[in-house]
Image: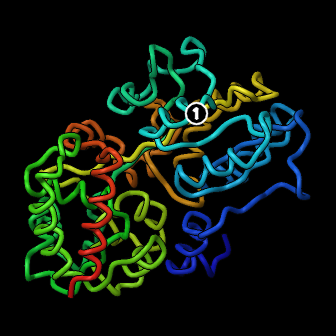
Amino acid sequence: MTDTSARNPLSTLQRRLRAACAATALLLVAGSSLAQAADLNALIWCDHSDPALLEPFEKANNVKVNVKEFEGTGAGLAIVEQSQPGDWDVMVIDSIDVPRGVEKGLFEPLPEDKLPFADLFPEVKMDKSTIVDGKRYGITEKFGYNTIGFNKTKVDPTDMQSLASLTNDKYKSKIAIYDYYLPVIGMAALAIGKKTADLTEADLPALKEELLKIKANAKLVGEVTASQTALATGEVDILVGGGEWVTAGLAKENPALDFSIPKEGAVLWSQSLAMFKDSKNKDMALKFIQYILSPEGQARLATSSCYWGMPSNTKAALTDDQKKVLRFDEQPGFLARAQAYPAPNADLDKKMQDLWTEMLQAK
């Protein structure tokens, strides 16, 4: 990072999040074909492409890690479908989507006795998602919250301890909404006292009413870069759907940015690593997963230049300052109030997307 970018939150934000919000995946493999099987080929989110994370593993194991970035499980699975069996060794995937890969016959069960499950935050092991038919196919590596991100010099931090503040006239035109329907609908559910796991079609009218109230206070609804840039530059003071993944990486450049886990709760996001059944390099794939879950690997992943997040391993080798920014010591209380992403069936999912579209179009 240059001195200029270190002083400029906007340029830093764009640099860290450009890959995460790109419409197309970025292939970081030379040439048009995948590298030799002796290398490790990984489908990843942008936080894994940081040289500070990859280079120590490559040097220690005399291997090249070829990465291809994607955004969203659907995009990742589409890449796999267009590839040949054995092209990929490991994949980063939303923890709740691990069963989708298992159903397609993609993943290899993980050897639990060779991974540090005992050191993980219990609440993020995601057993209901990562264990299928008694076998574990994913291990949580990083997590965080879709919640309230805010500028603590512009708003009353006490107000940010309740989701009710999002509909308060006090913050009219001072709010941006992250344009992703599932976590924000989950936040609306928490605001009206509903559990994200129990949502049904009968809840849609109440969810719509709450979303429209928040929208009435919003200056903009935007994708990752637009919404977060608005918060970083002061265009808005609050980001609905933000969290440590927005504010932590910018703490040095803009210490006024913070996040809260309101009394009603927050929506927990969690990403996992999985190994491909057809991997041609399973031993190295397992070593990579072990490295990422090690205390050192966890610290590097948690503070990746693309975006920060909480390491799943409680023994992550973070500095005291990094732990403070991530609110590490407060995690037990945060996790106790957090709920998982809504996981609607196909019919309810479509209705939720329609509801989101109605909210976006509302004046």
Q: Where, quadrant-wise, is the N terminus in this rendering?
A: bottom right
Q: Which residue appears at 47% of the width and 21% of the height? A: 117
Callout 1 environment at 10 Å: few (<14), some (14 to 19), or many (20+)?
few
32 sits left or right of 124 in the view? right
Which image quadrant is residue 90 in? top right
Up-down relation of residue 151 to residue 124 (above or below): below
Q: Position of residue 212 (x, y in %)?
A: 16, 74
* Left or right, 8 with reference to 362: right
Return the x and y of residue 19 as percentages of the image width and height. Answer: 62, 65
The location of residue 296, given as percent across then percent down, is 61, 36
- Indicate the amino acid at tag 1: Lys
Question: In the drawing, does residue 110 fall left or right of residue 128?
Answer: right
Give the answer, above or below, for where 212 lies relative to 187: below
Up-down: is 210 above or below 64? below
Q: Nearer the viewer, residue 355 or 191?
A: 355
Tell me the residue at 69%/51% (across/down): 52
Q: Quadrant of the C terminus?
A: bottom left
Secondary element type, mark 1: loop
Q: Residue furthest front?
A: 347
Counting from the top left corner in percent of width and height, residue 214 is at 17, 74
Give the residue pinned by disc 1. 104
